[in-house]
Image (tube, grey):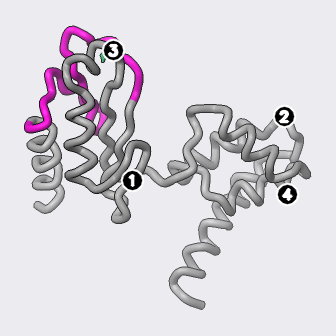
Amino acid sequence: MSQMELIEEKMEERVDRILSCFSGRREELIVILQRIQDEFGYLPEFALIRVAKFLGVPEAHVYGVASFYAQFRFKPMGKNVITVCRGTACHVRGSPMVIEEVKNRLGIEEGDTTPDLRWTLETVACIGMCALAPCVIVNGKVHGKVTPRRIAEIIKAVEGVEKK
Ligand code: FES
């Protein structure tokens, strides 16, 4: 068995372990999806197919419910997450330029993760710190009055720490 097949089998076992805690009622769908996302950090496609079989509902129903809620992700998260505020105050004070800098530097679009799974770029509506606009959250820490230059420094600093 190849390394990849082994990893996939392990992932399937993890999903089955989660499903074994449920009885297979349709009302359990959202809680099951939450448990799977807690386990993997996102909802892998094979897991959604397995959930549909387990609950005896069409795959389209599972996808429909999962896409309705903003909390669910369909792609893996990077080890580091940059969340740029797109609220009005941040927008007028330059958040689009900060987003551009992150996109160019990391080679990804909003909502994407780098292929090496090191960085994810997200945007969000007002985070309630408009006086510090434009705001960026990097790995849970809020940075205020962020310029393109500053976000480049923050990214470099995180990468520097990881290399050590
Ligand atoms: S608009 Fe960005 S913090 Fe309010």
Answer with mark 2 or mark 1, whichever residue precedes in sequence. 2
In the picture provided, is 108 more to the left or to the right than 157? right
Q: Nearer the viewer, mark 3 or mark 2?
A: 3
Q: CA distance from mark 4 to mark 3?
A: 44 Å
Answer with mark 3 or mark 1, whichever residue precedes in sequence. 3
Q: Is residue 19 above or below residue 33?
A: below
Q: Is residue 115 above or below residue 94?
A: below
The amino acid sitting under disc 4 is Lys
Answer with mark 3 or mark 2, whichever residue precedes in sequence. 2
Label ID, residue 88: 3
The magenta segment is 124-149
Give the residue furthest to the top: 131
Give the residue furthest to the bottom: 1
The amino acid sitting under disc 3 is Thr
Q: Quadrant of ligand 1?
A: top left
Label ID, residue 53: 4
Q: Which residue is mark 1?
A: 113
Q: Quadrant of the C terminus?
A: bottom left
The residue sitting at 58% across, 80% down in the picture is 6
Along the line of sight, which residue is nearer the eye, 16 or 42?
42
Label ID, residue 27: 2
Answer with mark 4 or mark 3, whichever residue precedes in sequence. 4
> Where residue 86 sits: x, y (%)?
35, 24
The residue sitting at 28% across, 21% down in the picture is 91
